[in-house]
Amino acid sequence: EPEVTQTPSHQVTQMGQEVILRCVPISNHLYFYWYRQILGQKVEFLVSFYNNEISEKSEIFDDQFSVERPDGSNFTLKIRSTKLEDSAMYFCASSVYGTGEAFFGQGTRLTVV
Amino acid sequence: GENVEQHPSTLSVQEGDSAVIKCTYSDSASNYFPWYKQELGKRPQLIIDIRSNVGEKKDQRIAVTLNKTAKHFSLHITETQPEDSAVYFCAASIGTSYGKLTFGQGTILTVHP
């Protein structure tokens, strides 16, 4: 069964450093998402991406965040200058139609120290 | 924007009992309601979903009911087993929002053998 894959599984970074989280969505999916989950809290929407542009973003997704689909398979989330409060599990997800089932990756645990 | 409230936050049952988790949503434009199961340290996985044109959906021991008038939906698990122990998240999506999911706070279900 196809899966969304994310790398790395765990990333530790110094405050103020840039990080790039990588995702390979399921190949025939057209809609891509990033969510985050702070430990013990609910999953929060960050951004959706369709047709090579951001379709919606949350208040969390400020100027420090950016997304890119650099080629036909990868989907990345960049945080330019990490803060302690960016520490969370980041999930990538994808869906075929944007109105149905979203498949989640296994997550990248980001720890900012 | 959409807001999803989920109750209870924790639920403890004996093996074989039924478990019910309830969610309410705020935006009447929401038309897709998935339920995700998340085991410790793993990705959220879709277990059942329902669309607004349906009142109930069943899949073996799992069922979801939707009351559009009251804007609430519920997950029902019958004959619970220890492997059902996990965090369960409800979510809601508006058809025009490119698949953005708004999640509830989660319910920690513990099934005691």
Image (cartoon, coloured by chain):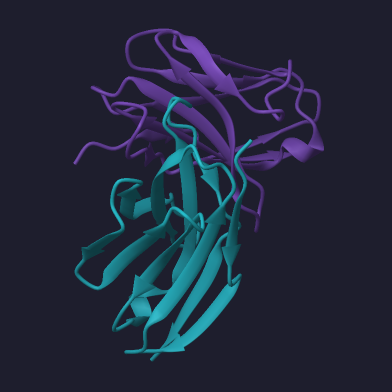
From where the camera sits, is residue A113 visible? no
- Residue B94, horizontal then vertical, whole percent: 47, 35
Residue A58: which quarter of the image?
A: top right
Q: Nearer the viewer, residue B107 or A100?
A: A100
| Quadrant of the frame with the C terminus of chain B | bottom left
- Residue A81, horizontal then vertical, whole percent: 77, 21
| Quadrant of the frame with the N terminus of chain B | top right
Q: Nearer the viewer, residue A97 or A35?
A: A97
Horizontal arrangement in the rendering, residue B64 relative to residue A17 (left or right): left
Which residue is located at x 39 percent, y 9 percent?
A51
Q: Nearer the viewer, residue B67 or B92?
A: B67
Q: Is residue B15 above or below residue B83?
A: below
Q: Is residue B18 above or below residue A32?
A: below
Which residue is located at x 44 percent, y 53 percent?
B68
Which hue belongs to chain B? cyan
- Residue B56, horizontal then vertical, whole percent: 29, 61
From where the camera sits, is residue A71 visible? yes
Which hue belongs to chain A? purple
